[in-house]
Amino acid sequence: MARTKDFNEEEVLKKAVCLFWDKGYNGTSMQDLVDGLGISRSSLYDTFGDKHQLYLKALETYQQGYGQQLCALIGKAPSAKAAIRELLELVARDLLGDKQRKGCFVVNAGIEMASHDKEVNGMICQSEQQLEQAFLKVIQNGQQSGELDKKQDAQAIARFFNNTVKGMQVSVKSTSNARFFQDIIDTALSVLG
């Protein structure tokens, strides 16, 4: 007869996100996971598989939450320029609000793992594509409404803003100067005319 779990899987995944986000994949030992998650090593293996599988689940959990938050924000804004400004400002607020200056878990995973881990690489590519597509939709809507110049390449601009977000997510590791991020946002928005 199968034993029932005496822990909430969702809560354990949230803790795993925090651990991996803080220490990275290579910096997080199995003992760190057992101690930090509050479950036994056997429960960890039985529920999530090995460390790598848990890392992928944690990354997926983070991606879904953050990606949905950003895409929802873009969908509610009154104009294309407002949507992009709100998204960039939300990213800056989130980054600056983190006293540990961890950056973005997805970007960190990309830097640490994507070049040699196909599964992580696939997840990073999917995440980037999701954000790029959200920017693209906003830009195309702005072009159709006449707010943005139709002569500009919407795909190229979407890629530019996607890369701007990634740059901010890396830069927070070395600066917590709010003016620095506001300058990036203002300069990036000048691309829209």
Image (cartoon, grey):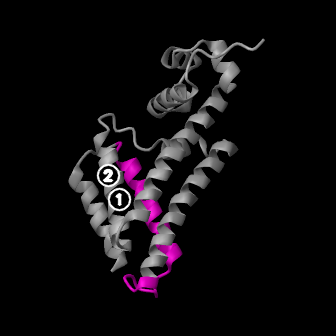
Residue 89: image x %, image y %? 31, 57
Q: Which mark is residue 88?
A: 1
Outermost residue to the right: 1
14 horizontally vs 124: left or right: left
Q: Residue at x 30, y 68 (%)?
A: 187
Q: Is residue 162 magenta?
A: yes
114 vs 155: above or below:
above
Q: What whole-number distance in Å separates the C-alpha atoms at marks 2 and 1?
A: 6 Å
Mark 2 falls on what kind of element?
helix
The C terminus: image quadrant: bottom left
Q: Is residue 168 magenta?
A: yes
Residue type at tag 2:
Ala
Q: In this rendered view, identify the residue nearer to me: 109 or 115.
A: 109
Residue type at tag 1:
Leu
133 horizontally vs 44: left or right: left
Q: Which mark is residue 147?
A: none
23 horizontally vs 26: left or right: left
Mark 1 falls on what kind of element?
helix
Q: Residue at x 51, y 27 (%)?
A: 11
Residue 54: image x %, image y %? 62, 30
Q: Residue at x 56, y 35 (%)?
A: 58
Q: Residue at x 47, y 29 (%)?
A: 23
Residue 149: image x %, image y %? 41, 85
The N terminus: image quadrant: top right
Q: Which mark is residue 92?
A: 2
Callout 2 touching callout 1 (CB < 8 Å)? yes
The crowding category of the residue bearing disc 2, from other C-alpha atoms within 10 Å (few below 14, some 14 to 19, many at least 20), is many
The magenta span reads 144-173
136 vs 180: above or below:
below
